[in-house]
Amino acid sequence: MLEKFAKRNRRAIRVRARIEGTATKPRLSVFRSNLHISVQLIDDLSGKTLCSANDIDAKGTKSERATLVGQEIAKKALELGVKECVFDRGGCLFHGRVKALADAAREAGLAL
């Protein structure tokens, strides 16, 4: 079990070292727990969260809720005038709920 967390932390550090969000191209940071998923658009230069979304009130399967979160964050980002961002999956693998969220955000008009 400890090795699983160590691998996740190594992935998170490796992913985070390669990306940085700016005001024109913020970072879309994903947090995935066992039950829920949440995302934030972050401007790393000023250290501020521009907008966020989560699936706490959504109904359906975990993947369906992740799709709704992706659509919601894309809608909020487009209202702020953000058309593209860098995708920070953290230590999560790009598979399942994380992939469903990213695909839904892309379909809703956000360039990742």
Image: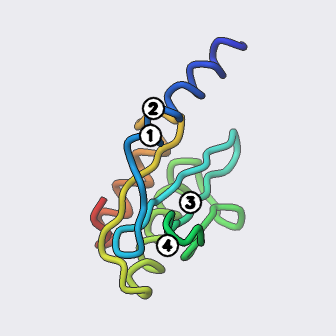
- The amino acid pointed to by label 4 is Glu
Marks 3 and 2, Cα distance to the nearest angstrom?
19 Å
> Which mark is in front, 3 or 1?
1
Apparent side of residue 109 relative to residue 97 in the rendered image (left or right): left
Q: Please name the residue that numbered disc 3 is placed on.
A: 39
Marks 3/1 in contact by CB < 8 Å: the verdict is: no
Q: Which is nearer the eye, 102 or 58?
A: 102
Give the number of the disc on residue 87. Answer: none
> Is residue 25 shown above or below 1?
below
Marks 3/2 in contact by CB < 8 Å: the verdict is: no
Q: In terms of secondary structure, where does tag 3 sit?
A: strand
Which of the 4 quarters of the picture holds residue 27? bottom left
Quarter of the image with the N terminus in it:
top right
Marks 1/2 in contact by CB < 8 Å: the verdict is: yes
Q: Please name the residue that numbered disc 4 is placed on.
A: 72
Q: Please name the residue that numbered disc 1 is placed on.
A: 17
Give the number of the disc on residue 14. Answer: 2
In the rendered structure, which disc, 3 or 1, sits on the residue that comes first in sequence?
1
Marks 2/4 in contact by CB < 8 Å: the verdict is: no
Which residue of the protein is positioned furthest toward the front in this rendering?
Answer: 45
Q: Residue 15's spot in the image, x, y percent?
A: 43, 38
Q: Residue at x 39, y 49 (%)?
A: 19
> Which mark is in front, 2 or 4?
2
> Which mark is in front, 3 or 2?
2
Q: Residue 83's spot in the image, x, y percent?
A: 30, 75
Which of the 4 quarters of the picture holds residue 4? top right
Marks 1 and 2, Cα distance to the nearest angstrom?
5 Å
> Is residue 105 shown above or below 48?
above
> Is residue 6 shown above or below 96?
above
Marks 4 and 1, Cα distance to the nearest angstrom?
27 Å
